[in-house]
Image (cartoon, helix red, strand yellow):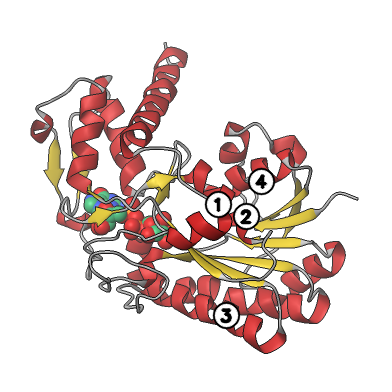
Amino acid sequence: MSKSALVTGIMGQDGPYLAKLLLEKGYKVYGMIRRHSTPDYSNIEYLGIHNEIEYVEGDMTDEASLISIIKNIYPNEVYNLAAQSFVGNSWDQAKVTTEINALGVLSLLTALKFFSPSTRFYQASTSEMYGLSHTDGFQGEDTPFHPRSPYGISKVYAYWMTVNFRESYNMYASNGILFNHESPIRGIQFVTRKIADGVARIKLGMAKELRLGNLESKRDWGFAGDYVEAMYAMLQQEKPDDYIVATGQTHSVREFVIEAFKTVGITDWEKYVKIDPRFKRPAEVPALRGRADKAHTVLKWKPKTSFISLVSIMVEADLKRLKNIQKSNG
Ligand code: GDD
């Protein structure tokens, strides 16, 4: 019999990449969606897998809905990718961020504990938990957490709850501590996609400027398609554990901007970029750079996509998308 997996957050960026990988491995994939009058399947359609997923309705803030799903399908694996994942919004919506990202995880773990305790559980943890903290310029599994946003704080709670279910009830529950990972289906509010889309618009004469916040913050950016392989590998180990997934390289937002403009042949990028305080955060995470040695050794995982290829994949995808829009508008 083929294995089954429940993926929460199936409509986001990582859900479709992970679902595609699981389908290729022969899994039956259930995708949890919230009730919407008009659900947006565009990311799933982008990867061409819409018809292969079985959708189940549920909400991280509604424990009964999670119990009902778990009791109906008894999945072999659960990948919890559902979240209010935009750090910038989390100050204005701290409570709902906490309800989804922290208490939602408690509810899901509780549902598994009572109704399907042998299910393997993956929690989408994040480098945002480190915030200000680093060890010689890197963040490793042993670096202490110092979150800088309500989002980061909610994720620290979920991280420890995952560890606690593992230690208290002997459940197979693992945390993937993923550093920033991007793709053409990244939400438009995240800085990489905002830059890719903005640069493509400027190139095509559809926009005159790109408004951004802090250009100096540094991130360890990888490709989402590579990172879902590490998620999968984490649940195939003999024992549950927590792993950093990162490239080990860091670049500033400014470098991303320069590289994106370079992709379309524009060198005088400063003419187009305007700094807008609305996109600055009350507390910033200045620099992230992950040390993924454990993932290299134990999971045999390595990133395949370089920073420069990532930027060009994203800008080219937005150019293509926008050209199609221009064409269909005549
Ligand atoms: N979004 C955004 N918009 N960010 C900007 C802008 C802007 O106009 N200008 C500068 N930035 C800076 C932010 O201040 C931040 O330092 C950096 O760009 C990256 O911002 P995001 O792309 O929004 O991502 P993030 O690093 O805050 O969070 C992402 O990565 C985490 C893992 O480290 C999200 O995917 C989180 O969900 C994830 O956990």
**Position of the C terminus by quadrant:** top left
Q: Which mark is residue 300?
A: 1
Residue 255: x %, y % from top left: 19, 42
Residue nearest the observer in this picture, 321 or 112: 112
Q: Which residue is mark 2?
A: 233
Residue nearest the observer in this picture, 175 or 158: 175
**Is the CB atom of the residue marked by disc 2 within 8 angstroms of ligand 1's nearest atom?**
no
Q: Earlier in the sequence, mark 1 or mark 4?
A: 4
Query: Of the residues shown, which amino acid type is indicated by label 4?
Result: Ala
Q: Which residue is mark 3?
A: 163
| Element carrying mark 4 | helix
Q: Which residue is mark 4?
A: 19
Residue 6: x %, y % from top left: 72, 58
Please tell me whether residue 320 is drawn above or below residue 136 in the rendered image: above
**Is the CB atom of the residue marked by disc 1 within 8 angstroms of ligand 1's nearest atom?**
no
Q: Residues within 10 Å of mark 3 (few under 14, many from 20)?
A: many
| Element carrying mark 3 | helix
Tell me the CA gap for discs 1 and 4: 21 Å
Q: Nearer the viewer, mark 1 or mark 3?
A: 1
Q: Are marks 1 and 4 in contact (CB under 8 Å)?
A: no
In the image: residue 312, left or right of residue 24:
left
Tell me the CA gap for discs 1 and 3: 23 Å
